Amino acid sequence: MSGSSSAPHVVIVGGGGTGGALAHDLVLRGLRVTLVERGELTSGTTGRHHGLLHCGARYAVKDRESAVECIEENRILRAIAPGSFELNDGLFVAITDEDAAYEPLFFESCLASGIPARRVGRAEALRLEPNLNPELRCAVQVPDGTMDAMRMPLRFFATAKLNGATIKPYTEAVAMTMRAGAGRAVAGVEVLDRASGARYEIGADLVVNAGGPWAEKIAALAGVEVPIQPSPGVLVAVRGRYANMVINRLHASGDGDIVVPQREISVIGTSSWLADDPDHLTVPADHVAKMISEGSAMIPALASAAVRATWSAARPLIGERGATSGRELSRTFKCFDHAPEGVEGFVTISGGKATTLRAMAEAAADVVCAKLGIEAACRTREYVLSPHTAYYA
């Protein structure tokens, strides 16, 4: 299904979920696609999140745009990636009187965002999830779910590859090559094969920067800037599955207020701070302690659970540097055409969440096709993805 030899060639820099979804989208529109990733696929932020299939409820009160994006993509992903999700729903629990006072605004905001929500009384909540704090006041049930952070996005890579995309892991973009003549236009990417040490050029009609929190560094190779603020967060995995539903604290989003069941572990997340370099993240001990203390406020047994792993991952939030916290920045996404900055043939897509990777790819593909004069509709809303195992076939 790959484009003919005369079709425009697009190079995607970044092998996270967004890059994979974009490769899938562009191949379906008849373009030739090459994707390069400096490490293994999904080895950046995509493979390090807690595995939540967002319904958007977390953002319904303060970030309506992101909430609507999430519930729309939640429904689409369930249809095109069957079998990739545990459709276990989410429960937002009010532990304090202050939490309970937040419930009416939260509930109405969910409904206004198109998110199905059901009020759950204290007795029913404890019957559904016996390990919850017995002091809880009330709860709200929403259509959250869980996913494998690598396997779900790998379905996009598998489908793109089967349809003709060229996927090159361990291939790092180290420079942009520019077209000769007047003006500045990207003509391709110079890459480093990290296995062999060879450097070579991949020519392109257009290059897309899908580097997530690394998008700023990749854009600098083309001499442009993007307003991306890396916002790391610590996650803690403990041994044992202490809830079957995704458990969220019923209050404005904060640190340690979500517990995501993943097979036989529970992932507690997450904190939020701002960083300059996503390659040099720390796992502060006080953040780990806070994840456990805040998580155990919802599920007391977490306080004594054995820690299996701790790690941090950087969110690629859209916003100029200068914010004091990642909580101030929206979780929506944006596509940047850098032609107004004087560089043609170069586009950046960033922001968003794992749940919205397909929508991000559609937005970027629309921009790419418009720039290349390609008239082809997006097909990824209905196209059922190949299983993740097909990538290795």
Image: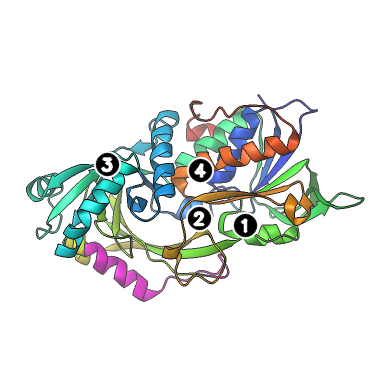
**Three-letter code for the amino acid on which mark 4 is drawn:** Leu
Mark 4 or mark 1: whose residue is earlier in sequence:
1
As drawn, the residue found furthest toward the right would be 181
Quarter of the picture holding the N terminus: top right
The structure residue drawn at horizontal position 25% and vertical position 62%, both measured from the top left corner, is 295
Q: Nearer the viewer, mark 1 or mark 2?
A: 1
Estimate the spatial distance between the alpha carbons at disc 2 and disc 3, rounded to whole Å: 24 Å
CA–CA distance in space, label 1 to label 2: 12 Å
Residue 294 in percent (x, y) is at 25, 66
Relative placement, left or right, of 309 versus 358 is left
Q: Residue at x 28, y 38 (%)?
A: 116
Q: Which residue is mark 1?
A: 215
Which quadrant holds residue 219?
bottom right
| Residue 13 drawn at (x, y percent) | 66, 49
Viewer-proximal residue, 121 or 157?
121
Q: Are marks 1 and 2 in contact (CB under 8 Å)?
A: no
Residue under numbered circle 2: 45
The magenta stretch spans which residues?
275-296
Q: Amino acid at mark 3?
A: Asp
* Numbered circle sitting on residue 114: none
Along the line of sight, which residue is nearer the eye, 161 or 26?
26
Residue 117 appears left or right of 8: left
Q: Nearer the viewer, residue 326 or 5?
A: 326
Say which residue label 4 marks: 357
Quadrant holding the C terminus: top right
Q: Dot 4 surroundings within 10 Å: few (below 14), some, or many (20 or more)?
A: many
Looking at the picture, tell me which residue is in the foreground, 123 or 303: 123
